[in-house]
Image (tube, rainbow, N blue to C red):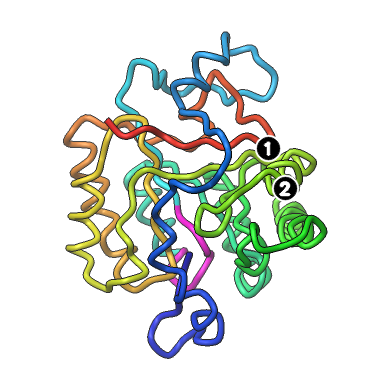
Amino acid sequence: MFRSRPGRRRGTAAVLLAAASLMLTLGGCGVDTVTPQDAREDGGTDGKPGSAARRVDCAEAKCIALTFDAGPGRDTPRLLDILKEKQVPATFFLLGHKHVDRYPQVVKRIADEGHEVANHTWTHRILTDLDEADVRDELARTQDAVEKITGRKPTLMRPPQGRTDDTVSEVSRELGLAQILWSITAKDYSTTDSALIRQRVLEQAHGDGIILLHDIYDGTVPAVPSIIDELKRRGYTFVTVPELLAPGAAEPGAVYRPEKD
């Protein structure tokens, strides 16, 4: 979920802020979830079709996935510079309207620099409030827009507020999308304090964790370098979500969520 910076994107923010406190509960999605460990164990060998090439074995290494929602935005190029300098891959769950369609060159750069490009719907509507046709439209429009820019449709999606159900799962399966939730968040939509964002991430960090941040808020991108440096110091290896699951492959329609230590 996201809200605008002061003075920007106020129309979208008014619709979304009312549900901000619900975003991070993760407890009521109403469907079974799969952990990264389960995905790896079910994956068997590296030769499984659709599995990510294993740059690192997350069954042995202390892996963590850095993910960003609701971009790209004006600060995403700066974030990409940081990730390139730190040699850290990330997974970007992109929003279609006023983001993918506004920053196509940034979307292409995300893909070209080896990050995972994923789907966060077209307009950030809560999918569990929609009928099947509208769920399909929210996801398919972003699929098509990303493919037009990068030549490849995403295989991962993150439902707004982490809210999913059987209908969302079925449409996701139909479109070839696995659903990715999270286990670590800074609630960066609620603060511009980069030090606080850093503290919240570091306090929750755990192996096989998936970090949720947003590259559209003023406090977030400035916090990223020190988050990366400290987690590396603690022995973490940064991976994309597909790498976290490898040699397993994210199954369309399934919902993936790490368990905290």
Q: Is residue 207 above or below residue 175?
A: above
Q: Nearer the viewer, residue 157 or 58?
A: 157
Residue 166 occupies quadrant: top right
Q: Which mark is residue 84?
A: none
Q: Residue at x 21, y 30 (%)?
A: 235
Residue 109 occupies quadrant: bottom right
Q: Earlier in the sequence, mark 1 or mark 2?
A: 2
Q: Residues within 10 Å of mark 2 (few under 14, many from 20)?
A: some
Left or right relative to 185: residue 139: right
Q: Secondary structure at mark 2?
A: helix
Q: Is residue 110 above or below residue 250?
A: below
Q: Nearer the viewer, residue 224 or 178?
A: 178
Looking at the picture, how far across and down is residue 19, in whole percent? 46, 69
Residue denoted by label 1: 253
Left or right relative to 61: residue 252: right
The stretch in magenta equals 68-76
Q: Residue at x 65, y 59 (%)?
A: 127
Looking at the picture, how far across and down is residue 16, in whole percent? 51, 74
Quadrant of the frame with the C terminus: top left
Query: Does the magenta segment cover residue 225?
Result: no
Residue denoted by label 2: 167
Q: Residues within 10 Å of mark 1 (few under 14, many from 20)?
A: many
* Residues at marks 1 and 2, CA–CA distance in whole angstroms: 10 Å
Look at label 2 and name its amino acid: Thr
